Image (cartoon, rainbow, N blue to C red):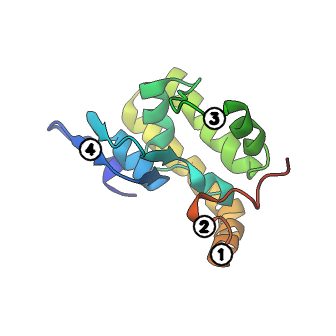
Amino acid sequence: MGPSRLIIKNPVICAISGYAVAGGLELSLLADMRVVEEDAVFGVFCRRWGVPLIDGGTIRLQAIVGRSGWFLKKNHKGIGIAKQLITFPELCLNTDRQSCYYSAYEAPSFQDAMSQEFNAGSRVISQETTAGAAKFSKGSGRHDSFKDHSKL
């Protein structure tokens, strides 16, 4: 959809301050090097609303950090994230996961992986994203809040 779907021939350096979430995360992953402020936040908050990654996020993120992920914050409670993820829209999570595996093990090219991610994500939009966007427009999930999704 945006510039993160491009293959840029020149080196790209990204400076990140504040939040790099959803499309912002995907855009930051396009860079060859990221300069990040200490309090910057990366995330895929759009999944709370059934919005899939369709601009290379599932392809580039697993290529950069692997499928196991990195938790760098000193006081981060990784298990809390794992418990919260199960309450997110299931089709969106499974579609992003399938795209990650496809790009890592089956895709014959980067362009093929990008096409598969976009096509699969487009199907999610018609099923989960509309309802999620309606909740968000009514004020849910603002300012990094996960309260409407946590059943702990």
Q: Residue at x 36, y 49 (%)?
A: 27
Left or right for 11, reference 145: left
* Residue reaching furthest to the front: 75
Q: Is residue 28 above or below residue 128?
A: above
> Label 4: which residue?
14
Q: Residue at x 78, y 43 (%)?
A: 86
Secondary structure category for the residue under label 1: loop
Q: Are marks 1 and 2 in contact (CB under 8 Å)?
A: yes
Q: Residues within 10 Å of mark 3 (few under 14, many from 20)?
A: some
Q: Residue at x 30, y 53 (%)?
A: 3
Q: Marks 1/4: CA distance?
A: 30 Å
Using the rendered image of the protein, determine whether residue 27 is visible from the camera's viewpoint.
Answer: yes
Disc 3 residue type? Gln
In the depicted view, which residue is nearer to us: 98 or 143?
A: 143
> Label 3: which residue?
98
> Label 1: which residue?
139
Q: Position of residue 17 (x, y in %)?
A: 34, 51
Q: Position of residue 114 (x, y in %)?
A: 44, 41
Closer mark to the observer between disc 3 and disc 1: 1
